[in-house]
Amino acid sequence: MELMAGLGYFLKLHGHYPSAHEIDNFEYLPSSRSIQRSYGGLQKLRERLLPGQISNYTKGDHRSGIAKRTYSNGRSLEAIFYEYLVSQFKEIAIHEHKLIRPGNVSCDFYIYTAETKGIIIDVFYAASIANLVNITNIKLKRYTLVAEKTYLILMGNDNITQGMIDEKCSRRHIPLPTHVLVVTDLYFRESVIPELLVKSKYALS
């Protein structure tokens, strides 16, 4: 059966069966909408074709396991990024989880580039470009009202390039606020940091 073959091929490549977003980006499987029409949804398809496997990825132990891994991964990324920041800026300029107003937003990092101004940094991991779009939409609710330039920085997935991010952002129905930029860790280090170091009174180099 072609559908089973496609699911098996995805499992071989990625080590797990696909979610709805992953199915829509995998050329060897029909779209999630097509599966909805033909089988009543992805959960029912899993129940039918993969008995004994987890059928609902949005509830129970599977979902809580993802949440725990996401939290742990996020904390690890923050630690890695902090070590990088202190190699570039004086430690006094780097504030973790600073509360920003208006909005009462606690960002991952705030870097002072002058005595009373700086930039906001929020680091995150995304498993796919579709996942990145969803995460960006969630984070925008937090950072839309802040005044400082805000960098949402993708870490831990080199398969997503800055070009892919820029292409997705350019096609948004509602454009990103001008003060919010979504960038890869590589782009931030190679293109943003050099400009910040030139302007900052807290640069180490």
Image (tube, rainbow, N blue to C red):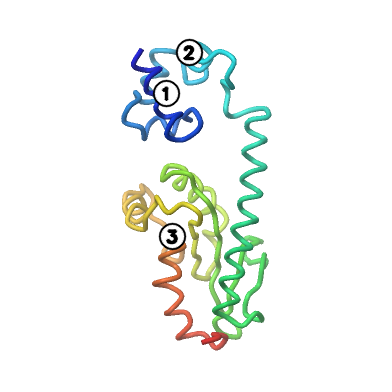
Q: Are marks 3 and 1 in contact (CB under 8 Å)?
A: no
Looking at this view, is 200 or 101 the one in front?
A: 200
Secondary structure category for the residue under label 1: helix
Q: Nearer the viewer, mark 3 or mark 1?
A: 1
Q: Are marks 3 and 2 in contact (CB under 8 Å)?
A: no
Disc assigned to residue 68: none
Q: Are marks 1 and 2 in contact (CB under 8 Å)?
A: yes
Instruction: Tell me if 107 is positioned left or right of 36 in this view.
Output: right
The answer for how far apart the CA atoms under marks 3 and 2 are is 38 Å
Give the percent coordinates (x, y) of residue 130: 42, 42
The answer for how far apart the CA atoms under marks 1 and 2 are is 10 Å
Residue underneath mark 2? 49
Residue underneath mark 3? 184
Which of disc 1 and disc 3 is earlier in sequence? 1
Query: In the rendered structure, which amino acid carries the disc numbered 1?
Result: Leu
Dot 3, crowdedness within 10 Å: few (<14), some or many (≥20)? Answer: many
Residue underneath mark 1? 7
Query: In the rendered structure, which amino acid carries the disc numbered 3?
Result: Thr
Instruction: Tell me if 138 is positioned left or right of 37 in this view.
Output: right
- The quadrant the N terminus occupies is top left
